[in-house]
Amino acid sequence: MKPSRLDVRHLRYAIAVADSGGFRRAAEILNVAQPAISKSVKDAETDLGFPIFERSGTGVTVTDAGRTFLEDARLAVASSNAPSGPRAATPKARAVTSLSGTRRLRPRRRSRKGLMRSMRRPRACRSKCMSCPPIQC
């Protein structure tokens, strides 16, 4: 028996397809290319050994086996998004999860290098003249 290649991404994509009713709409919601969604779901179906969806020209419908799989997938995704560990209780460490499944612990800040770049003097005023405020590091 081959090891399974399923990960949380496969589960999220399958859930999005089921909720939206089609691969194109799921790709738009997740901001991912449609072929990537199709391949991911097809790989999941191959690994599982049964079809999750019945495909038709007008969209997809969930099979009975797929419905059971999606129920379990929703629980798995919910548990993977739950913060755990000692940092989970602090408000700064709350995980922010977007619909595409990316997680980050804090709002992104501009790097020090980018901040310093935006604080540079204008090109014409690079010499230390008195009209420009001093730059502090």
Image (spheres, grey):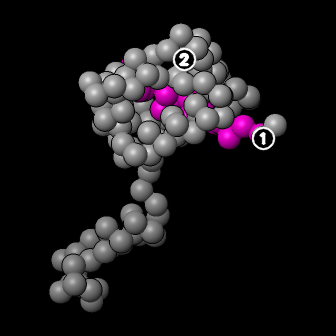
Disc 1 secondary structure class: loop
Amino acid on which disc 2 is placed: Gly
**Is 123 in front, or is 78?**
78
Q: Is residue 95 visible in the rendered structure shown here? A: no
Mark closest to the chain's N terminus, 1 or 2 = 1
Residue at 68% over, 31% down: 87
Quadrant housing residue 81 = top right
Residue 27 coordinates in the image, percent (x, y): 35, 37
The residue carrying pointer 1 sits among few (fewer than 14), some (14 to 19) or many (20 or more) residues within 10 Å by Cα, namely: few
Relative to 122, residue 136 above or below: above
User: Residue 33 location, x and y as percent?
Assistant: 37, 46
Residue that mark 1 sits on: 2
Name the residue that disc number 2 marks. Answer: 66
Q: Which mark is residue 112?
A: none
Residue 63 versus residue 92 in the image, above or below? above
Q: Which quadrant holds the N terminus?
A: top right
- The residue stretch that appears in magenta: 3-20
Residue sitting nearer the eye, 47 or 56: 56
- 80 falls in the magenta region: no
Which secondary structure type mostly characterizes the magenta part of the structure? helix
Residue under the image location 45 percent in, 69 percent down: 113
In which image quadrant can residue 57 be found? top left
Residue located at (51% from left, 34% from top): 41
